[in-house]
Image (cartoon, rainbow, N blue to C red):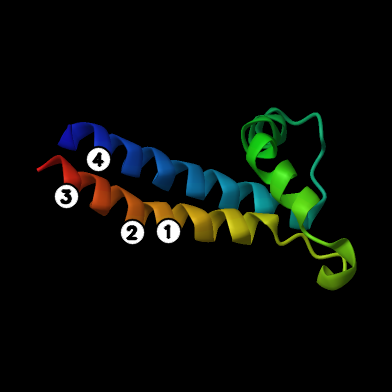
């Protein structure tokens, strides 16, 4: 079971880097038909879109804070939930 928790941690870490890459690539106005851009959007939008809908747009000044919020949530899961899960297994 420890291997499963380690794998979940690794998966969350990889997804964090994908979110960072997707956020950084938006700063350069990429071609939306680029395969890398399409992959990043397909992988991140299912998670970022619901967070984006919850954020009031008038308070962020047009800045998309959804990647930051998702990254904080991932860090919480990695640092609190997964260790607690691992301890409860033993």
Q: Quadrant of residue 3?
A: top left
Circles 1 and 2: CB atoms closer than 8 Å: yes
Determine the CA span between mark 3 and mark 1: 16 Å
Question: Badge 4 is on which residue?
Answer: 6
> Closer to the observer: label 3 or label 1?
3
82 vs 63: above or below: above
Determine the CA span between mark 2 and mark 3: 12 Å
Q: Is 18 left or right of 31, judged from the image as shown?
A: left
Residue 87, numbered circle:
3
Q: Secondary structure at mark 3?
A: helix
Callout 2: few (<14), some (14-19), or many (20+) C-alpha neighbours within 10 Å?
A: few
Q: Quadrant of residue 86?
A: top left
Q: Secondary structure at mark 1?
A: helix
Q: Secondary structure at mark 2?
A: helix
Q: First in sequence: mark 2 or mark 4? A: 4
Residue 37, numbered circle:
none
Residue 54: % across, % down: 76, 53
Determine the CA span between mark 1 and mark 4: 15 Å
Q: Is 38 left or right of 79, judged from the image as shown?
A: right
Residue 79, numbered circle:
2
- Residue at left 25%, top 45%? 85
Q: First in sequence: mark 4 or mark 3? A: 4
Determine the CA span between mark 4 and mark 3: 13 Å
Callout 3: few (<14), some (14-19), or many (20+) C-alpha neighbours within 10 Å?
A: few
Figure quadrant of the C terminus: top left
């Amino acid at each position: 079971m420890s291997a499963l928790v380690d794998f979940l941690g690794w998966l969350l870490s990889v997804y964090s880097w994908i979110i960072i890459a997707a956020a950084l690539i938006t700063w350069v106005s990429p071609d939306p038909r680029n395969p890398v851009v399409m992959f990043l959007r397909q992988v991140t939008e299912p998670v970022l879109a619901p967070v984006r809908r919850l954020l009031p747009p008038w308070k962020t000044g047009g800045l998309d804070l959804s990647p930051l919020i998702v990254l904080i949530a991932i860090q919480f899961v990695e640092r609190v939930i997964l260790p607690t899960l691992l301890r409860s297994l033993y």
